[in-house]
Image (tube, rainbow, N blue to C red):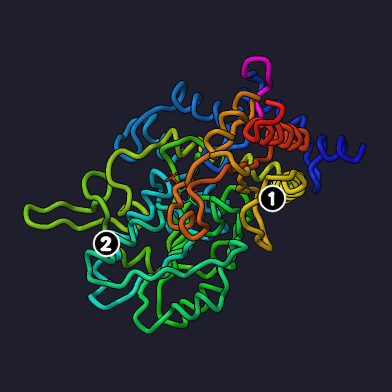
Amino acid sequence: MERATAQRTAPTGFDVAELRTEFPILARRLGPHPLVYLDSAATAQKPRAVIEAVSRFYSEGNASVARGVHRLSGEATAAYEGARAAVARFLGAANPAQVAFVRGTTEAINLLAATLAERVEAGDEILVTRLDHHSNFVPWQRLASQRGARFVIAECDEEGELPLAEVEGKLSGRTRIVALPHVSNALGTVLPVSEIAARAHAAGALVVVDGAQGAPHLPLAVEALDVDAYAFSGHKTYGPTGIGALWLSPRLARELPPYQTGGGMIRTVGDETTDFAEAPQRFEAGTPAAAEAVGLAAAVEWMARVGIEAIAAHETALAEHAVARLESLDGVRVVGRPARRAGVLSFVVEGAHPHDVGTVLDAAGVAVRAGHHCAQPLMRRLGLPATVRASFAAFNTVEEVETLARAVERARDLFRGGRG
Ligand SMILES: Cc1ncc(COP(=O)(O)O)c(C=O)c1O
C-alpha cells in the first residue's frame, strides 16, 4: 500500500503516473517488456513540451539568429535570447549575459581550458578530483602538460566522498584552477561545492564546476555557490542534444578571450585585427543552435513547473530505495556510500562482468549503463574495471526499482550457475 502510494505521488507532490504520460517514449515496449529507462545520467528522455517546442521552432519560426533584418530572423533572435533568460533563471543567475550557449558540458570545459591557458604557467598547479568525468579531467590534464603545470588529483575515500581535508591538503599557493563535479556521474555523490570553492578562493584559485549531473538533479543557485564557472548539458536536463550552457562569473565573462572565432562574435573586423563582442556573444562563434536553445528553455521551464525540489526529492528517494533493495541481495554490492546522493548509483554483481549484467537487464526491458562511465581514474581507485549504473529521473517509479532489483537477482542467479 505504502509502495503503491509512493509510485503514484513523489515525496513532495507531483503525480508520477500523470507525468509519465508526457513522455511519448515511455509508451515503448521492448519485446514483451515495458521500457524501464534507468539511464538518464547518460541522457534523459524528453517530455512532449520539449519535442513540440523544437518542432514548433522549425515549423513556424526557423531563421538564423542575429543575422537578418527580416521578421523571422527577429523572432528567432527573440526566441534564442528568451531561451538564454530561461536558462539563467534555471541556474539562479541574475544576468543572462553571463550565460553562454555551448554544445554541452564537454565543450564548456574545453572552452575554459583553452581560454584560461595563458593564466597557467610552468610550476603552477591544476587541481581536479578523483570523481571527475573524463570531460572535466582530460582537458585539464592536457592543459597542465602543455603549460608545464602540475596536475594534482584530490582523492575520494572508500565511500565515494571527497573529504574537505583532502582538498585543503592538495591546495597550494600555486593552484590556479580547481575543477570539480557538482555530482559524481558514477556514484551519485553530491559534492560540497561552496565549501570547496571557499577554500580554493582563499588559495587564490579559480573554481570550475562540471554541473552535468548537478543541473538535472539539484535546485541551482549558481551565484550562491560562489564559483567562477558552472557548465551543464541540455540533453541530461530533459532537453535536446547539441546544446548546453556555461555560466561565467562577472569577472570571467569580462576577461576571458574568445574560444573560437568567426561570425557572430565580433564587433568590427579590420584587415589586421578584430574587435571582439562582449560576453556571451564572444563565446558563441558561428550560427547558434537556436532550435536546440528553444528546446532547452522548454526543458528547464518544464522542470520548474514540475518543481525542481520535488524532482530532486523523488529521485533521491528512488535511489535510496534502490540501494536498500540491491544491498538486500546476496552477491550484489552497491559501490560508494555518499552521505548525500543524487539519483545515481553504481553496483556490481559478484562473478559477473557489468556488461553481462547490463545485457541480462536489457533482456528484461531495463536500460542501465554498464562500463567505466567515462570515469576511468575513479574505476582505478575503486579497483573495478566497470560498474552497472542505474540513474533516475522525474518519470521513474518505485515499481521500476522493483523491476530492476528482480532483474539483477536473475542476473546474479544466472552467472552463479543457479537457476539460469
Ligand atoms: C559528470 C559529467 N560531466 C560531463 C559529462 C559530459 O557531458 P556531455 O557529453 O553532454 O558534454 C557527463 C556526461 O555523461 C557527465 O556525466
In terms of secondary structure, where does tag 2 sit?
Answer: loop
Question: What residue sits 37% from the left and 54% below the top?
Answer: 280
Rounded to the nearest angstrom, the CA distance separating label 2 from label 1 is 36 Å
Q: Is residue 273 above or below residue 296?
A: below
The residue lying toward the viewer, choosing from 139 and 324, is: 324
The residue wearing badge 2 is 257
Tell me: residue 76, above or below residue 260. above
- Farthest residue toward the front? 417
Quarter-wise, where is residue 407 in the image? top right
Q: Which residues are magenta?
A: 30-36
Query: Is any atom of residue 249 visible in this view?
Result: no
SS at badge 1: helix
Instruction: Note whether residue 253 is visible.
Output: yes
Report the residue marked by disc 1. Answer: 312
- Residue 236 position, x and y percent, is 53, 42
Q: Amino acid at mark 1?
A: Ala
Quick check: 392 left or right of 72? Answer: right
